[in-house]
Image (cartoon, rainbow, N blue to C red):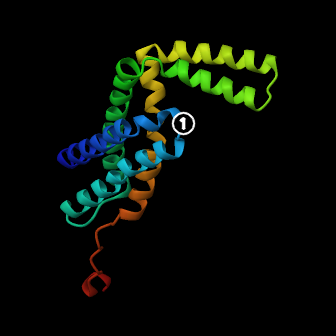
Amino acid sequence: MKRIVIVFGLISGVISSAMMFLTLPFMDHSSFVLGYTAIFLSMLLVFFGIRSYRENAGGTVTFGRAFSVGILITVISCIFYVASWEVIYFKIMPDFADKYAAQEIATMKEKGASTAEIAETQKKMVAMKAMLDNPATNAAMTFIEPFPVGLIMTLISAAILRKRPATPPIAATALA
């Protein structure tokens, strides 16, 4: 199990990291669809990892064991995702929070928001930047972006791929 989890977790993590770096040019346009599509693509490895485990285990796997394999792959992938974001946020785009806040305020002004609403949003953005500037908080917040996708993928994959061993037929002599 360990080898399959590590191999598929690393592949998923590399895909996750690569997709994050490749989508950097689109980050100013706040394309959540593009980001979650990238996360979903990397989490497809959860399905393939569970399937590989089942095939290597003689063609059978319980839901619990399949869930364990899938969630471990998800955690490894999420760690890569977090590490990539930490590099991006603190080294490549240290002004991300400021740009995001400015974009949100500009959108509010375009929509005709009141001065009080804009001031409240500005306060929230200052608090958000303070949280993101703390690496531990930033990592925790970033971890919860891909993890639910991986959890759902794990649950669905474990349910689809579970396969119990065939029970031997009851012998006629046992009935007599």
Q: Residue at x 27, y 43 (%)?
A: 9
Residue occupying the point 64% across, 27% down: 104
Left or right? Give the position of 152 relative to 77: right
Which residue lies at the image location 69% right of the left edge and 20% below the top edge? 121
For this view, does 30 lie left or right of residue 63? Answer: right
Residue 101 image point, x, y percent: 60, 21
* 66 versus 139 height, above or below: below
Residue 127 location, quadrant: top right
Q: Quadrant of the C terminus?
A: bottom left
How many numbered badges does the structure rendering display?
1
Q: In percent of the image, x 43 and y 17: which residue is there?
A: 94
| Type of amino acid at the residue the image marks with label 1 | Ser
Residue 126: image quadrant is: top right
> How many residues crowd around disc 1 within 10 Å: few (fewer than 14), some, or many (20 or more)?
few
Task: Examine the image and state in which quarter residue 109 appears.
Answer: top right
* Front-lying residue, 156 or 134: 134
Closer to the camera in the image, 45 or 55: 45
Looking at this view, is 122 or 77 the one in front?
A: 122
Question: Where does the image place residue 171, in percent across and percent down from the top left?
Answer: 26, 83
Measuring from the top left, give residue 70's x and y in whole percent: 34, 49
Residue nearer the viewer, 100 or 131: 100
Q: Is residue 54 above or below residue 34?
A: below
Dot 1 lies on which element?
Answer: loop
Q: Identify the residue position indicated by label 1 in the image.
A: 30
Q: Position of residue 45 (x, y in %)?
A: 32, 52
